[in-house]
């Protein structure tokens, strides 16, 4: 196996699964947590992520297939997606995907799901656009939670893709409005969060 990414929440490996290219995601123990609590949390989060990956497909969102879940080892084996993260593309390529990224986000939110780590690194483009890494996702009916997703990806546009932030945000929110009935309310809350952040920095 080849380590691809070592994260705070899990490690990601390139692997093989019965002759198929695959990704192995494993949640390692946290020494600062009580052992029983840590085991329970890792098991719950592993099961939740696998379930979410299945669920998003039913919404019309492309995501990796789940091949196997080991709740004792806290691992998920899933499809390897041949492609590039949206984060790594050039500006014109990023802009070409923003509308669909917004549509995917709207589909999530309208189904009562918060992604939890909505960044341009968690959208991949290969033969099509994929949404990945549902490890921090949760079920929620609170527009404030959906606005946190929107605020995060806007911050990513602003920090990592500053040259196109305004056009990218316009395209993403246009796509979002196509699939999210409560889009006006969520974007209003997103704007309010942004204004509070600006005020806090000034003070």
Image: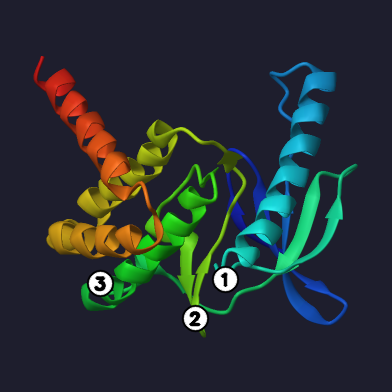
Label 1: state its secondary structure.
loop
Name the mark on residue 28: none
119 left or right of 79?
left
Give the residue number, with chain letter if any, for mark 3.
95
Mark 2–mark 1 contact, CB under 8 Å? Answer: yes
Considering only order in the chain, which callout, 2 or 3, is on the residue closer to the N terminus? Answer: 3
Q: CA distance from mark 3 to mark 2?
A: 15 Å
Dot 2 or dot 1, earlier in sequence: 1
Name which residue lies at 90% across and 42% down. 72
Can you identify the residue that label 2 sits on?
128
The secondary structure type at the circle numbered 3 is helix
- Residue 201 at x, y percent in the picture: 15, 22
Give the x, y percent position of residue 68: 84, 61
Q: Residue at x 18, y 57 (%)?
A: 165
Tell whether label 3 touches label 1 (CB within 8 Å). Answer: no
Taking 7 as reference, is 23 left or right? Answer: right
> Quadrant of the image for the C terminus?
top left
What residue would you read off at disc 1? 62
Q: Nearer the viewer, residue 52 or 93?
A: 52
Give how far across and how far down residue 150 sits, in percent: 34, 46
- The residue sitting at the front extreme is 181
């Amino acid at each position: 196996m080849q380590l691809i990414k070592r994260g705070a929440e899990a490690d990601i490996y390139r692997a093989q699964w019965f002759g198929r290219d695959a990704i192995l995601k494993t949640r390692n123990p946290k020494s600062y947590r009580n052992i029983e609590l840590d085991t329970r949390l890792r098991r719950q989060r592993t099961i939740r992520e696998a379930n979410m990956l299945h669920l998003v497909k039913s919404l019309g969102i492309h995501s990796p297939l789940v091949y196997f879940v080991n709740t004792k080892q806290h691992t998920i084996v899933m499809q390897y997606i041949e492609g590039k993260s949206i984060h790594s593309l050039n500006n014109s390529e990023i802009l070409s995907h923003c509308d669909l990224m917004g549509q995917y986000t709207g589909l999530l939110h309208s189904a009562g799901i918060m992604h939890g780590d909505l960044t341009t690194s968690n959208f991949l483009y290969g033969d099509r656009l994929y949404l990945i890494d549902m490890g921090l996702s949760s079920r929620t009916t609170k527009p404030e939670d959906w606005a946190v997703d929107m605020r995060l990806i806007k911050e990513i546009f602003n920090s990592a893709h500053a040259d196109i932030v305004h056009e990218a945000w316009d395209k993403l929110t246009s796509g979002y409005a196509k699939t999210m009935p409560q889009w006006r309310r969520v974007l209003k809350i997103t704007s309010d969060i942004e204004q509070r952040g600006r005020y806090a920095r000034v003070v």
